[in-house]
Image (cartoon, rainbow, N blue to C red):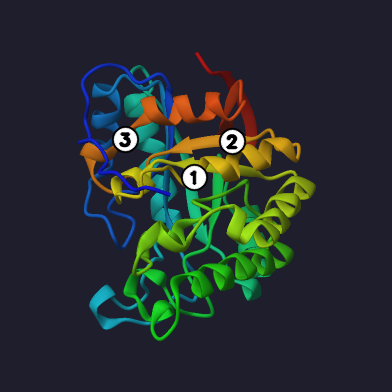
Amino acid sequence: MSTVNAKSAGTPGRPVLQGDFHIHTEFSTDSEAPVRSMLDAAIRRGLHTVCITDHMDRDYPLDKSLGEEPFQFDLERYFCILTEIQKEYRDRLDVRIGVEIGLQPHLGEVYREMTARYPFDFVIGSLHLVHGLDPYYGELFEGRPDGEAYRETFEETLRCLENVQDFDVLGHLDYVVRYGKHQALEYSYEKFADEIDAVLKKLISMGKGLEVNTAGLKYGLGFCHPHPDVLKRYKELGGEIVTVGADAHRPEHVAYEFERAKAVLAACGFRYYAEYKGRRPVFRNLQ
């Protein structure tokens, strides 16, 4: 697979997709963006709907540089503030409240209790740790080919799906490829078809969706997460639920490359994408 540099963010004009369902704010350890700055950016981009999905990665490895409890936040305060902001923006933007949970096989009951307690509109389940290692920091790739780490990540994703049920879509399926030493050089759907098919079949059997995440373009991969070949395979297997998110951590990345995301979905045979409200998908026509 060839890689190309992503175009700059913030292209003027209204994107063809009207809802960004993966946005981070100052509630996430890795973002400093005030909530209103992200919502104002969404309005400038012509969006109708957004969902704030800040990071909740329980049992993330302790790192003093990230604070006492990295990638966790006060959910009571989160709902209190976002509920007020919903009211403030209701005439300009439909703001929904979500969360991105960090999948690990032992956290099924923790997330079951959390999602039962709080009235999320949308829950993304994403793999950020492979046996306790975050691919972002590079240790996962030390002393071995990238492809070996990718295979291990897909296998760990399946283990997570077997043990964590309380989410709506799987986020950025091939996220690990962003951080490989050679990125996509050792990656293709065909090379990992057995592992990826097992993940996709499990998602479909669970009634869960798959996220199209445009941050892959931002990271220079030349494709959204997951690769279009994976999206096509999901469709072939009977998958119907796809959401779209830019994984924005700064205002300029809200609705990043949504024009390309729409074209990818259409080329893969999808006629609809989904937005979530009250944990239920609402299907929107791809126009």
Q: Is residue 110 visible?
A: no
Distance from disc 1 to disc 3, alpha carbons, whole Å, reads: 19 Å
- Pointer 2 local density, CA inside 10 Å: few below 14, some 14–19, many at least 20: many
Q: Which amino acid does label 2 sit on?
A: Val
Q: Between disc 3 and disc 2, whose residue precedes?
A: 2
Distance from disc 2 to disc 1, alpha carbons, whole Å, reads: 16 Å
Residue linked to disc 2: 242
What SS does tag 1 mark? strand
Q: Which mark is residue 256?
A: 3
Q: Which mark is residue 175?
A: none
Q: Which amino acid does label 1 sit on?
A: Gly
Callouts 2 and 1 close, C-beta under 8 Å: no
Residue linked to disc 1: 98
Q: In which quarter of the image is residue 4?
A: top left
Q: Between disc 2 and disc 1, whose residue precedes?
A: 1
Tell me the residue at 24%/29% (across/down): 40
User: Could you say which is closer to the camera, residue 69 or residue 252?
Assistant: 252
Task: Say if 135 sits above or below 39 in the image.
Answer: below
Q: Where is residue 76 in the image (x, y as percent from the top left)?
A: 45, 55
Q: What residue type is labelled 3?
A: Tyr
User: Could you say which is closer to the camera, residue 95 or residue 143?
Assistant: 143
Question: How many labels sit on residues?
Answer: 3
Horizontal relation, residue 109 to residue 23: left or right: right
Q: In which quarter of the image is residue 115?
A: bottom right
Task: Say if 267 sits above or below 78 in the image.
Answer: above
Q: Is residue 68 visible?
A: yes
